[in-house]
Amino acid sequence: MVLGVSVLVLASLGALSMLISVIITRPLYASLVTFGIIFILQFLLPQIPYIKESSKYSLSYQTMVLLKSGFEKVNLLKFTGIPEHSEIAFIVLALLMLLLAWSVLSRREFPD
């Protein structure tokens, strides 16, 4: 269970970094932008007071929602959510980012 969730989360992060590296061709800048996006989504988004329960949108919270169904002896009741929805969201976002990266790369390499 943990291995599957780790692969799923890392695949979505890898798709994000691939998309950013296709858009920004300099490796250092692409790495910094990817780190900045992850930092904003992980640490700054839960601090926004205008979004109701904004911590539910962080990467760590959704990872715990995915892991919640696999652990019986650990109390994870404060993490509310449906694991299947989080799983589908990670898969769809990863595939969407990969398709967008492929589209940008193919337009750049094979112009009309």
Image (cartoon, rainbow, N blue to C red):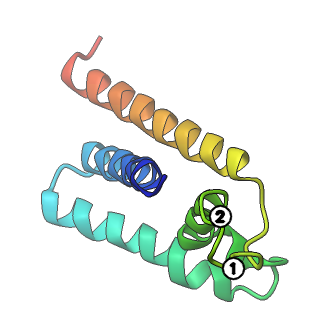
Disc 2 target residue: 68
Label at residue 75? 1
Q: Whole-percent x and y of residue 58?
A: 60, 71
Q: Whole-percent x and y of residue 27?
A: 14, 58
Q: Is residue 12 left or right of residue 61?
A: left
**Label 1 crowd bin: few (<14), some (14–19), many (20+), radius 10 Å:** few
Question: What amino acid is at disc 1?
Answer: Asn
Q: Quadrant of residue 82?
A: bottom right
Instruction: State which tag comes first along the sequence, 1 or 2.
Output: 2
- SS for dot 2: helix
- SS for dot 1: loop
* Distance CA(mark 1)–CA(mark 2): 9 Å
Residue pictured at 66% horizontal, 88% vertical: 47
**Label 2 crowd bin: few (<14), some (14–19), many (20+), radius 10 Å:** many
Q: Is residue 96 left or right of residue 85?
A: left
Residue pictured at 19% horizontal, 23% vertical: 109
Q: Whole-percent x and y of residue 99?
A: 43, 28
Q: Is residue 50 left or right of residue 9?
A: right
Q: Nearer the viewer, residue 70 or 93?
A: 70
